[in-house]
Image (tube, grey):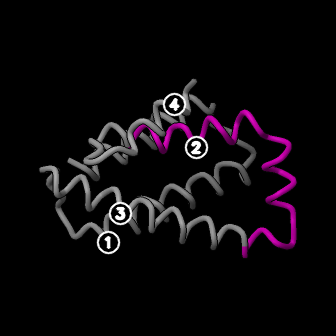
Amino acid sequence: AKDNVITAACSANPSASYYVAYAKRIVEYITEHEAAVNNLMNSTLFPMMLTIIIEQNRADTLERLNSSVAGGMKLSVAADTTASLCVGGVATAIYLWVRGGKEKPADVFSEEIGALISNILK
């Protein structure tokens, strides 16, 4: 059901709240699939897979940001830079959170990630 919110926002001109919800959903997904995520992160293929995921997510995010900008969203810097920062920053934060033993509760971490994305897209 939660995924429907994310996929529904794939329509033209997603708002800033879409990007916040998307980042939060990634944290939820990782929490819900902890064993699979741990297996992936311990795999020798993880660095290559992470690079592919980041590159694809950046391309998708850039495409959506360009649609958002065309629909009236204002960005403080170019869409390509914004996409790179958001995707790379979220990926790194999540990686370090998981590797650090998830010392911060998932709901708190998710809210913080959402707040950062929201501030970037102001």
Among the two numbered marks 1 and 2 on one chain, the one whose residue lies closer to the N terminus:
2
Q: Earlier in the sequence, mark 4 or mark 1?
A: 4
Quadrant of the image containing the N terminus: top right
Check residue 78 for magenta coloring: no
* Residue in view at x 48 percent, y 44 percent: 23
What span is in magenta? 19-48
Q: State the separation of the CA atoms marked 1 and 2.
A: 21 Å
Mark 4 vs mark 2, foreground winner is 4
Give the labeled residue for mark 1: 80
User: Residue 75 appears in which quarter of the rendering?
Assistant: bottom left
Number of other residues with Cα within 10 Å of mark 4, as a class: few under 14, some 14 to 19, many 20 or more: few
Q: Earlier in the sequence, mark 1 or mark 3?
A: 3
In the rendered image, which residue does mark 2 sit on? 26
Position of 68 compared to 25: left or right?
A: left
Please give the residue where the numbered disc 3 appears in the rendered image.
63
Disc 1 versus disc 3: nearer the observer: 3
